[in-house]
Image (spheres, rainbow, N blue to C red):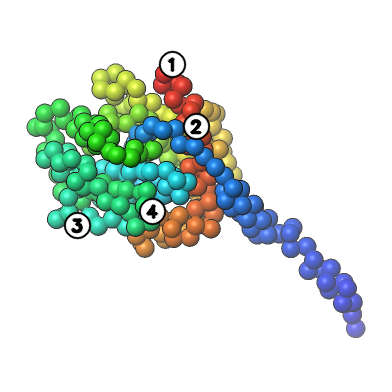
Amino acid sequence: MFHVKQSEKAASFALPDDTPLARELADLSARRRALADVQVEFPGRTRIMTISNQKGGVGKTTTTVNIAAALASLGGRVLVIDLDPQGNASTALGIPHSADIPSIYDVLIDGFPISDVVQKSPESDTLFCAPSNIHLAGAEIELVTQVAREQRLKTAIDEYLRDLDTPLDFILIDCPPSLGLLTINAFTAAEEVFLPIQCEYYALEGLSQLLGNITMIQKHLNRGLRLSTILLTMYDARTKLSQQVADEVRSHFPDEVLGTLIPRSVRISEAPSFGQTVIAYDGNSAGAIAYREAAVEIVRRGDGIAEKKES
């Protein structure tokens, strides 16, 4: 009969640190500790970013709300403008947005001040949202007859910022995946385009169209608009495809791509159904940590972006 000594049994179970799961948990723990010690300084001016991608299903709204929540967790004052008629950003931030609640539609069509529609998210005292609602679905048609139809959002934002007692650090605009008057209003109001790209096949599909649209807006409506930030989402470290896509995007946009990768995550997918961002839903998850790391990068890039703008 074959006998194994007790010491040999112990030795066979003495290498947990060498398993992929153990390494992943150790990495998450180290990143969590690093974030706990991180300190960032906000630039003292409001950065206005529109989160856009003409291709659907890339994590655009998910990125908007989670970056907003992550920025707020760092101490920033953040406003999310939900310009998508589906209202998913409003839902994820825990903001009521039924048909009878004042929304960004009233701002664009009826000239309401943004201050009349802004609500504070239950997640943070420094996180706010100008919600969408079902009326916004008809705004594309109604805007056609409006005076200065491409400038309606910019004018409203300028007035809102001018009247604020405490300035905002970021305004993030979540717009529809199509190029209509809502998206044109977002591009005209923003300084920066923030582009989420999923690490999947056809990731760069439609990108040339987006870059063409940015050029068109620069030429006719907003000379200061530029693609400043690209975030790689839905990254799966187990597949060669994710790494290949990441490498390809970085080769085309070395200065714009953030170093942080947002992983495929069940927690990120689950959070909106609870009316929460992943930051609030499970702040220790891999997805929440990644979004917080991305937020740190975005804040720290602010000085360089300001220098480019001045030059």
Return the residue found at the far left: 145
> Label 2 to label 1, Cα distance in Å?
16 Å
Left or right of residue 220: residue 246: right
> Label 3 to label 4, Cα distance in Å?
22 Å
Q: Does the image show residue 106?
A: yes
Corner quadrant of residue 272 = bottom left
The amino acid on which the numbered mark 4 sits, given as a three-letter code, is Ser
- Residue plotted at (74% across, 59% down): 17
Looking at marks 3 and 2 on the same chain, the residue that comes earlier in the sequence is marked by 3
- Residue plotted at (45% across, 55% down): 279
Query: Disc 3 vs disc 4: which is toward the camera?
Result: 4
Looking at marks 2 and 1 on the same chain, the residue that comes earlier in the sequence is marked by 2
**Marks 2 and 1 close (CB-CB < 8 Å):** no
State the residue position of label 2: 301
The amino acid on which the numbered mark 3 sits, given as a three-letter code, is Ser
**Label disc, if present, on residue 98 of the rendered structure:** 3
Mark 1 Cα-neighbour bin, 10 Å: few <14, some 14–19, many ≥20? few
Task: Return the residue nearer the eye: 182 or 191.
Answer: 191
**Label disc, if present, on residue 124 of the rendered structure:** 4
Report x, y in % for residue 91.
30, 56
The answer to whether 216 is drawn above or below residue 157 in the figure is above
- Residue plotted at (64% across, 58% down): 25
Q: Pick the quarter of the image with the C terminus.
A: top left
Q: Does the image show residue 24?
A: no
Report x, y in % for residue 276.
38, 58
Looking at marks 2 and 4 on the same chain, the residue that comes earlier in the sequence is marked by 4
State the residue position of label 1: 311
